[in-house]
Amino acid sequence: MSGAMSLTRFRELLQRRLGWTFADNDPGQTAAVLAARAKAHGLTEREYLDRLAGRRWTAEIAELAQALSITETYFFRHGEQFRVLRDTVLPDLIRRRAGQRVLRLLSVGCSSGEEAYSLAITAWPARPTPDWIVSVLGVDANREMLHRARAATYSPWSLRDTPEEVRRRWFRETGDDGFAVHPDIAATVRFAEHNVADDDPQLWHPARYDVIFCRNLLMYLTGEVAAGLVHRMTRALTDGGYLFLGHTDSLGSHPKGLELCHRGGTVYYRRQSAAPPVPAPEPAPARERPPARPAPTVDTRSRALGLLRDDRFAEALDVLGPDDALLRGVLLAQLGRVAEARDTVHRLIDVGGPHPDAHHLLGVCHELDCADQAAGQYRLAAYLDPEFAMPRLRMGLLARRRGDHRGAAANLAAALELLPHEDEERVVLFGGGFGRLTLTTLCRTELEACEVRR
């Protein structure tokens, strides 16, 4: 069996056993793991693959998960999600769980435990009275990471995004410059080994968890395994329970059984209640209704877009109807009226909810005063529409400016793949006067520069 055939078969077995998918442009690590594991058992690669395929080899699957997992994490990663958990989600849950006085939280793909402990640190102080129970479970397929998680001791690097007051309250310094999680917090968290490709009726018992965090995991799974995991997580949430995914994971705008929520610059999901829907209010008499505002006509919008293509922004704004908020915001930004552009886009989001194009435009506006906020808006736009090339391009350019060549390369490569299929109107709205070909050339040039400097 050739090396390429062995690698292909190995990947197929990993998809079957772990549910993982792999990028075709990064075979090196996978091939190295195959060779190392075969050697560890004194087998040829063919013999090793035959054994892996022939029967359930639980111990070896755990070793493979450990060898192939991406384990880098830290406390309070993507802090905006923990702020929403603290300020919005937990107060809502506490009101609705007052009878039981129990909060159950789950961290899926918990790695070395930072996320699970971050959940506990956020939920524990939110208890209205000391008799409330906070229970956090972290699950992962990587045994070595779970061993580290149970030790509950971390390096300063793991606390690099932890607020100083949180560090002082919930961690204790150890003699070797490490930090141990406070015993009250450690006592609320437990860990279990679990392969997300498998079902587990006890783990995924219906209505078991109030909050589930499963961040940046779905992108590594095959479509079938990811869909099965989402179904199990949705079923395992209590009515009105909350699901947080990573910025790279998206369920679209209408996921089954969940409603899309947006607050504090982040997107999350809420399990729809099984209670009967509230009847819609009776329509007001015609004389009490405000007059409807006319929708923009196709001709008006086409004229405005044509003027935008010609960089005649003020003329385009003059001919544009009052209800085309997104195009109005783009034109205001082009004219340098950034504060008005932001107000326009915020009103659009307030009325219509999260909108990838609107969040992208907010990113463009924020690039003038806060690159971090701009990057956050671009991430949100890409999250809401994974096929949207423009925020990937802007994130890549921002990362290049910061000297983050690895992050820049990842986003620019994604943009380069998406640009040929980008919607033409989006190119006009957000291309800064450049066409698809010029943007593609820019993207390729920047990506090549990243590869040189990595």
Image (spheres, rainbow, N blue to C red):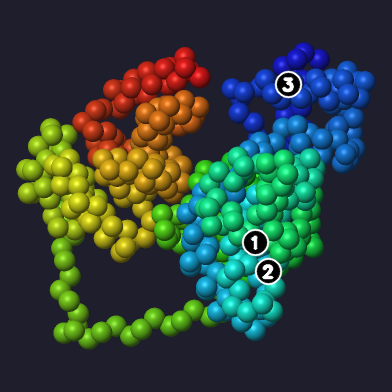
User: What amino acid is labelled 3 in the image?
Assistant: Ala
Measured in 3D between alpha carbons, the distance from the residue under mark 2 to the one under mark 3, in whole angstroms, is 43 Å
In the visual, does 191 lie left or right of 384?
A: right
User: Image point 87% across, 20% down: which residue?
Assistant: 39
- From the top left corner, tell me how far across and down residue 208 is, in percent: 70, 68
Badge 2 density bin: few <14, some 14–19, many ≥20, Cα 10 Å: many
Q: Amino acid at mark 1?
A: Ala
At mark 2, the secondary structure is: strand
Q: Are marks 2 and 3 in contact (CB under 8 Å)?
A: no
Q: Circles 3 and 1: CB distance less than 8 Å?
A: no
- 169 to 94, vertically: above or below: above
Depth order, front residue of 331/222? 331
Q: Which mark is residue 31?
A: 3
Residue 298 in the image: above or below residue 402: below
Do labels 2 and 1 touch, CB within 8 Å?
yes
Quickly name the residue at label 1: 120
Residue 429 seen: yes
Q: Kindly indicate the quadrant of the structure image that contains residue 343.
A: bottom left
Marks 2 and 1, the one that precedes in the sequence: 1
C-alpha gap between disc 3 and disc 1: 38 Å
For the N terminus, the quadrant is top right
Q: Residue at x 52, y 73 (%)?
A: 91
Of discs 3 and 1, which sits in the foreground? 1
Q: Residue at x 28, y 43 (%)?
A: 369
Residue at which label 2 appears = 134
